[in-house]
Image: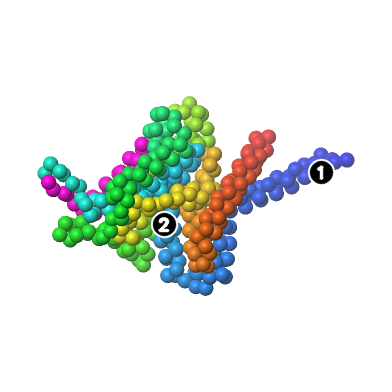
Amino acid sequence: MNTPHNSTSSSASIMSKDNLLLLVLKMRTFIALFLILAFFTVMVPGFLEPSSLVIMVKHIAINAFLALGITFVIITAGIDLSIGAILGFCGMVAGWLITKGIVLPMLGIAIFPSIWLVVPMVLVIGGLIGALNGLLITRYNVAPFICTLGTMYIVRGAAMLLSGGETFTGLSGNPQLGNTGFELIGSARLLGLPYAIWMMFILAAVIAYIAKRTQFGRHVFAIGDNEHSAELSGVKVARVKVWVYTISGLCAALAGIVVSSQLVASHPATGIAFEMNAIAAVVLGGTSLAGGRGSIMGTLIGAFVIGILADGLVMMGVSEFWQMVVKGLVIIVAVIIDQKQSRLQHKAAIVKQK
């Protein structure tokens, strides 16, 4: 016969195990990063050489831009499937402005803006596309999945129409037109590191600050936790959601600028399936698809896991088809782990209330 003391000890032991498991699940992104680094260090000679690491982190930065932007969206229990298309379209817009200029048919001239104007113009366009997503979702109650899926096709088609499906090349600009320097965004370095890497860490720091230190960040989490309660407490849900999708569009536009700058060319098909890598990084980083829970640092580490996994498999000579299989498995496992974490946190919350 169990005594109350034994029963209490048994319950405490179970909770101790649950707490330990919950801690491991919360640390899963760091654990996965460590294991992947250890695996490829053994399997790929020279994997951790500084030059190789810089190249990998430069690749990771592109996915990080997208993942950081979409983190707020997923925290609100939304989704944005259009970010890959926005990336490609904004790269095409940059290519158009640099190579074709702004044509004024009535005057018979074309204005070629400087790079200092091209970059903000492209960012604004990306932000406006994101804002349009937010307006359609909030004003017309279109499901985020359907809305952003439709936007993905529209924007991808618009990118094709800009050049008739052709690639804009020679984005270095023309000194006579005063629009040179675009390639420096992707090739120049500061203190030995490419600009893209610095931009990634700065963007992560800014978004982390917004998430943790601002009223907007608190409102984002409140909406994801319980949208109805957030609205009753005075949160302007529609406005916050529009801004969330605007941020996602801005980050996608930034990624498009960096990719086009690195290639010194822009192609309308650039960015296809990039949204899947971004979503994988966010979920792997601990952000719940159900909303209300997320970590900017986790997203950044998740982007490193996805990026290092992809580059490591390439360096091992693994087929691109198997790479797709591995990424798919990573997404499924990440969601399963997320569900397990949610159940444990819910259980811990009930015990704490008692």
The residue shown at (50%, 28%) is 228
Tag count in the figure? 2
Q: Nearer the viewer, mark 1 or mark 2?
A: 2
| Residue 157 horizontal/vertical position (percent) | 35, 44
The region drawn magenta spans 108-132
Q: Which mark is residue 6?
A: 1
Q: Main secondary structure of the magenta part?
A: helix
Q: Which mark is residue 183?
A: none
* Residue indicated by mark 2: 61
Secondary structure found at label 2 = helix
Based on the picture, tell me whether residue 117 belongs to the magenta stretch. Answer: yes
The residue shown at (12%, 46%) is 108
Based on the picture, tell me whether residue 42 belongs to the magenta stretch. Answer: no
161 and 241: which is toward the camera:
161
| Residue 155 horizontal/vertical position (percent) | 36, 43
For marks 1 and 2, the one nearer the N-term is: 1
The residue shown at (58%, 49%) is 332
- Badge 1 amino acid: Asn
| Residue 38 horizontal/vertical position (percent) | 57, 66
